[in-house]
Image (cartoon, grey):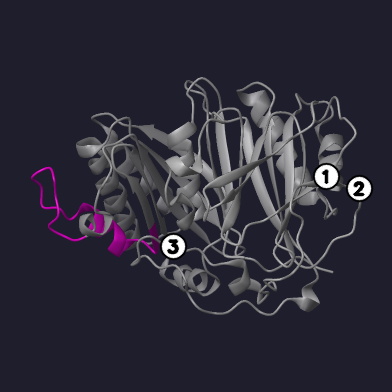
Amino acid sequence: MGPLNLPLLESEDIAWFRDDDSLPASTRGAAAALARRLGFDEVRCAEVALAVSEAASNLRKHAVDGALLLRVVRTEHDAGLEFVTTDEGPGMADVAGCLVDGSSSAGTLGIGLGAIVRLADTFDVHSLPGKGTAMSARFWTKDAAGRSAAVGEPVVAGLTRPLTGESVCGDAWAARAVGDREHIPTPPAERRVTGRESPAEPLGWAALTGFRPEPDRARPAKAVQERTDRTEGPALLMMFCDGLGHGPLAHRASQTAVAAFRDSRSQTPEGVLTDMHKALRGSRGGAVAVVRVEPLTRSVHFCGVGNVSTFVVDADTDERRALLSSPGIVGHQLPTLRTVRQELPRHGGVVMHSDGLTERWQPAALPGFLSHTPLVAAAQLLREAGIRRDDAGVAVLKGSW
């Protein structure tokens, strides 16, 4: 037994920048400084700074309540820089047209978005006219870009945003691959997501593992309770933790949960959650949910304690099914744990978020969001449902199963 070799990116949200008159200059300087810290050469630092500045300028010219997040992403061997923007409108009716040089609604040269697409190694944007836009771009060094392209776009990503006035967030998420290595073919060495396509299409699990579930395989029609440690085939575990309260102590609790999740040898949601409970003793504790996604059976196994919201979303029908947690606080009051199993739609995904996002969002109000990368899907959800009076975090796992 061994972990599945999936293209999972470790990520760290560095800083959110709110939309004001200094946004282009402040984000440009911060991006250049971060790129130098990561070892980018001066040419690539300048390209990163230009792309971030163009994105920030677009927020100033066109957006309502815009924000830009700088992130660090890491593979086993490389580190890269990523930015994400969100805004509340007015959106773009013709996204493809807006990416063409010379297209502008503000009387400018209209080269901003086109420049970002050319400079970034991966790029994605999802815009809803009258509602808002979410956009992401990722940058590697020249050597790292080739290695990243061979692996492909990760199937899971998330975002966290601290309560206004706080510098750290009490929400955190993490993912890791598990499964039987001897049944897993080598992932194809081809790039499925490029910086020249929009929208970007994430690698499906079948492309990553070679597994293609039989269409007539019997699957559960509804969620059922399970009390078993049996596992089947390659899988991905994902967890979300909302540290109790907010601020540094909540942040410390959620980071302890992340470390315990990564250190756990269990491959089942119940086992992982039990290990996290032990690690969180003596801390504030928190609400924690864990899912195990098995593409071979197209199933989601879920176990949760506290008020982390978890949904299985069907992109074809715009339906979402809630997976309900038990009352309690991980690290303090752990109830009897039960795992439920839910069918994973062929073009579906799993969404996990804290109560820093309202549960009132509906897939039908975000048409097409699951056709984009998990990061842009998460950003669109944060834009749509995030609230300012609490830490906010959301993670999205999706693929073509």
Sequence-wise, the earlier of marks 2 and 1 is: 2
Q: Nearer the viewer, residue 367 or 44?
A: 367
> Which residue is the site of mark 1?
339
> Which residue is the site of mark 2?
227
- Coordinates of residue 227 in the picture (x, y in percent): 91, 47
Q: Secondary structure at mark 1?
A: strand
Q: Type of residue at label 3?
A: Trp
Sequence-wise, the earlier of marks 3 and 2 is: 3
Sequence-wise, the earlier of marks 3 and 1 is: 3
| Observer able to see residue 356 | yes
Q: Type of residue at label 1?
A: Thr
Rendered image quadrant of residue 25 = top left
Q: Residue at x 80, y 47 (%)?
A: 269
**From which residue to which does the magenta span run?**
100-123
Rendered image quadrant of residue 398 = bottom right
Crowding around mark 1 (Cα neighbors within 10 Å: few <14, some 14 to 19, many 20+) is many
Report the Cα–Cα distance between label 2 and label 1: 7 Å
- Give the quarter of the figure containing the C terminus: bottom right
Image vertical order of residue 84 relative to residue 89, above or below:
below
> Which residue is the site of mark 3?
140
- Coordinates of residue 160 in the picture (x, y in percent): 54, 37
Q: Type of residue at label 2?
A: Arg
CB contact under 8 Å: marks 2 and 1: yes
Image vertical order of residue 141 relative to residue 129, above or below:
below
Q: Secondary structure at mark 2?
A: loop
Q: Secondary structure at mark 3?
A: loop
Report the Cα–Cα distance between label 3 and label 2: 44 Å
Relative placement, left or right, of 163 versus 205 is left
